[in-house]
Image (spheres, rainbow, N blue to C red):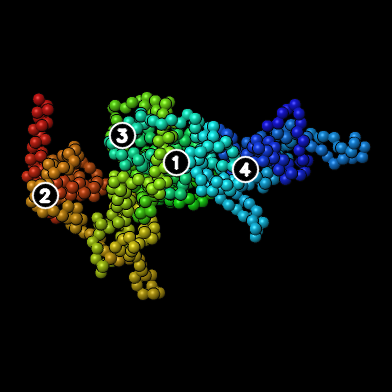
Amino acid sequence: MVSRQEKVVTPAPGNELAVARWLLEHPFSFSDGKTPILTYAGGQWLLWDRTTAWRPIKEDQLEDMIMRILDNAAYRTAPKEGDEEGVAPLKNWAPTSRKVSSIVKALRAVARTDMTEGDDSPFVTRSMVAGDWIDGSHTGESWVHLQDVLLNLRTRKIQPHTPKLFTYTALPFHWGDVTEGCPLWLQMLEQNFAGEQDQISLLQEWCGYVISGRTDLQKAMWVWGPMRSGKGTIIRILSALMGEENTAGMSSDALSAGGSALAPALGKTLVTFSDVRLQNSPKSVERILTWTDEDAMSVSIKYSDDFTGQMPGRLMFASNVTPRFPDSSPAIMHRLLILTTRVSNLGKEQSDLTSRILRSELPGIFAWALDGLDRLEKNGKFTEPESSLEVREDALEASSALLQFVQECCVLDPDAKVSLREFFDSYKDWCKETETFAGSQGALREKIDPSSLPITARRIGERGTSRPWHVIGCRLMTSAELMAHVAPIPADPPASSTDDSGDAPLDDYDMAILRACETVRTDAGEICAAMELDETQHTRTMMKDVGRLARRGLLTQSSTRIELSDLGLKTIHTATQLDLEGAV
């Protein structure tokens, strides 16, 4: 900043605004002497550097920097009679915490880039978004900050660094190092996605989208699949591509908590979540929608002003399960791009694969991602693999817990009605058994939307009375109806309902159910008891499993009996023979 050998001359301490402007024009100025490298936007201080681009700094850090600058500064007082040549001598600045605090307050007023002079009013606020140029130039262009140059992502033209590009992201390599080819990376993707090129194309476009800094397509990425199928490696490689300073790895609890828990995501280009479970977190859904909507969010920052503004980071989730949310609206599912890894490498992991890719292929992956960005911009939308559409459709049905409850536990009848309290009590029991978030009775009433459900909720009774709420258009199933509804099949299923039809092989749990039914059972609760399972927790799930096995022709079922079919008996006999042969 300032040499200790020579005092710099500043305005007097009493003129805080003048000192603040001096700081922006001298120590906090770019090499052109015109462009500040310090700004205040969105409730936080940002400092620019060639290696990191714009980076948030805490106010106490800024105060320390100014304290050191002014410790080597002096100012002139008003000239007095007798001063040599009428010039007052220099006086040491002698900064104190109080003086510096006053300067920082003045600096905040003159350093803001989110407030400009307007034509019809003294000031107009504007939202500074990553990728904007502070001086308003290069409108509609997309640039990225590399270690040696700025790169235009559309034209591939380069230009020298400048703080005029407002970006939080400085990628960790040089444009001169970028080469074509990343064979290890592509080989890994080919294996983990089982050769499904449309899934690889979607990941390629997503990587380019994250690099570009764009948020306008309002999407988040969800990668799911079996253990050791490459989900974590994909996230680690993309995080390294963006640079450690530009990414934040967080837990899904932070989305639920909000506030200061989201502070680590401020200024980050990529925000990742591993081992995600959000099915019982309505607040998480709300924040994902707000985030991807590009709406303003409020984040508490310790010992500083709260941040209010758009979060620039793209959200990326990894999980061993498909997306499940406590939300009857399809909005959240349509925000997600879904990738399904197919092949588990459990027991045959290559422990050094990630490090080998990071060591030799990041520049090549960058070039590969730019090709994906080109395709994305040409098509105007992401590639949607068929597998993604299937997962979304299944998840939409599963995520709509209320619709699922109505389908499984109610009889639709336009003339029927049930009190909201009774309806909610049954729904709450169902949620407990299915490990779904039930919420309150009032929240349930608000979810009953006739535009998406075949039922309505309204008060019944004369005005002036209590007029209790009722659910109109359905009634709750009786116990017998619930049992019959699980698997309404004939007692003699067709021969095609066998294991030869392509159904998944039976597991030990399925075989335990069949063996429990060697003795005729009256209901699912009896089967649970025979298997020593807690009836209160497992009966409804058992009803579904009985129905599934009945549809495969292994059980027969009526309103009063559940027993093995001939095929089920044959299956148990075959399994027993195999067990005996294995023992020999």
Question: Is label 1 or label 4 in front?
Answer: 1
Q: Helix, strand or loop at disc 4? A: strand
Residue 583 location, quadrant: top left
Q: Helix, strand or loop at disc 1? A: helix
The first of marks 2 and 3 along the sequence is 3
Residue kind at label 1, given as amino acid type: Val
The first of marks 1 and 4 along the sequence is 4
What is the spatial separation of the Cα atoms under label 1 and label 2, in whole angstroms? 54 Å
What is the spatial separation of the Cα atoms under label 1 and label 4, in whole angstroms? 24 Å
Number of residues whose C-alpha sits closer than 10 Å to that of mark 4, classed few (under 14), some (14–19) or many (20 or more): many
The residue identified by callout 1 is 210
Residue 39, numbered circle? 4
Question: In the rendered view, would you say 354 is above or below 221?
Answer: above
The residue identified by callout 2 is 556
Residue kind at label 4, given as amino acid type: Thr
Residue kind at label 3, given as amino acid type: Glu
Question: Is label 3 or label 4 in front?
Answer: 3
Q: Helix, strand or loop at disc 2? A: strand
What is the spatial separation of the Cα atoms under label 4 and label 2, in whole angstroms? 73 Å
Residue kind at label 2, given as amino acid type: Thr
The first of marks 3 and 1 along the sequence is 3
Question: Is label 1 or label 2 in front?
Answer: 1
The first of marks 4 and 2 along the sequence is 4
What is the spatial separation of the Cα atoms under label 3 and label 1, in whole angstroms? 21 Å
What is the spatial separation of the Cα atoms under label 3 and label 4, in whole angstroms? 45 Å
